[in-house]
Amino acid sequence: MIANRGEIALRIIRTCKKLRVKTVGVYSDPDIELRHVVEADEAVHIGPGEPSKSYLNIPSILEAANESNVDAVHPGYGFLAENPDLARACEESGLIFVGPPSRILGRVANKLESKRVVSEAGIPVIPGSRKEVSSLEDAEGEARRIGFPILVKAVFGGGGRGLRIIRSLRELKGGLERAGAEAKTGFGRSDLYLEKYLDKPRHIEVQVIAGRRGKVLHLGERECSLQRRYQKILEETPSPVLKNLERKRLVGLALKVAQVTRYENAGTMEFIRSDDGKFYYLETNKRIQVEHLITEMVTDVDIVEEQLRIASGDGLSLSQDEIEFSGSAINCRINAEDPSNRFAPTPGRVSRFVSPGGPGVRVDTALFDGCPVPEYYDSLVAKVACVARTREDAIRRMRIALAETVVEGVPTTIPLHQMLIENRLFVGGEYHTQLLDGLLKDWQPPSVITSEEAAAVYAVVRNRIAIPSIAVPPGLARKSDWRSSFQERSNLRPALYVEGI
């Protein structure tokens, strides 16, 4: 049973089909139409739309598992994926939990405890509070000791939720309240701690897979520094900033973290690289990551399959020497958010969806024409990834893929990604975690053209005639040349807006 929804549930179902493992999907009231409900062999209703009453409700999850008589539960990512209580409940019910056992999740899920363990092993960590902050007075004392600016962070959870940057004592109270509420909603726990805020660092993580007998493999690193409000927006592998010696040092630190924490199953060891090249351990993500697809694209390793093999007791299917790294891959997270309205979530219904294609393109999504985007859940609706022999070619493929992607009915962040892949700092690999927030201060997304304007564009492309309201670049005789130049200059994609033709 996949105790999750949407894209990641569909992703896990596909690997299960390959392995001829029957699946059970779960769904809340607003998710009854989603693709994972249809693609699973069975589907079980678990409650209303509110996450606390469905996807975060452990009794409902267990009841669904028992009702469907499954052998194992895969939590996906988010929701209860890193919750030791769910893992423990599964173990006590005789179910296999596809992920780290509860004893490991209980030890590593607590970021403070995890940092203490790795610090004692000699792995550098970012300075911060040594325990949870239990009151405003406690937080003020810790903030003075650490020194502003600081980060307020959720002890349990991740993905940028329950995290706030605080630059003065005046901001501390509000930051604690907002971070605590967000952590409670996203992970069911509101515990917080404080950490030193580093200036212009890079966020780089290492994917590991650990068997039950201490065997640990790595699948290389992913650069995750392009973030908006600490939410990852775009990831790539390999990192454009790392040289071979740095990469070996980083991978060595990640493997050491896995060993000292006695980690099992798939996980990601996350690090911050300071502007002077020092690595600091940040946290361990104890689940499959949103961005795992680009690692699969450059290694040809099915991470979900390895998760299932480890959980079933079969062990890893390969050795480190058998893992080959080939090419460069980029992933863009497409969110249902309105770039023209401070990226406010845009729940609604997708009237039309067209997926990009071509060599080296992968799209992980559960979207379809008429698909609902509920208000209750994360705004991620699709992941568009491209792989090529070189980073430059991967960027070129991504430009084409984003231009081909059609999502109508709800605004999305596609224009943001189109801006990013043209940015000279990104193209040059010279970016950091604070770059995007700075870029967005002056950025305005392109305006959507009206139906009448779209019809005029189509008429020009179809008939090669000039209309006064459309500025056709002079000297372009061939339709293909005109279309390419027009789209490049105006950032318009006629196919996205023309209906009924």
Image (tube, rainbow, N blue to C red):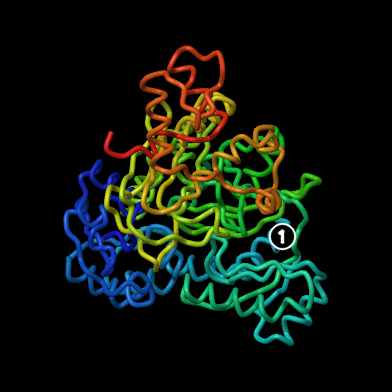
Question: What percent of the width, then of the height, locates residue 200?
Answer: 75, 51
For label 1, the SS is: loop
Residue nearer the viewer, 388 or 356: 356
For the point 67% across and 56% down, the residue is 281
- Residue 232: image x %, image y %? 56, 52
Residue 496 in percent (x, y) is at 39, 38
Residue for point 51% across, 62% down: 344
Please name whichever residue, 417 or 245, is drawn nearer the observer in this view of the structure. 417
Vertical comparison of 391 with 258: above or below: above
Indicate the amino acid at tag 1.
Val
Give the residue at x 34% y 61%: 4
> At 81% from the left edge and 46% from the top edge, which residue is drawn?
276
**Residue 327 visible, this angle:** no
Name the foreground residue: 456 vs 166. 456
Instruction: Locate residue 473: give its quadrant.
Output: top right
> Would residue 18 appear left or right of 258 to someone viewing this image?
left
- The percent coordinates of residue 225 (x first, y second) are 64, 48
Is residue 455 or residue 160 the one in the foreground?
A: 455
**Residue beneath label 1, please?**
125
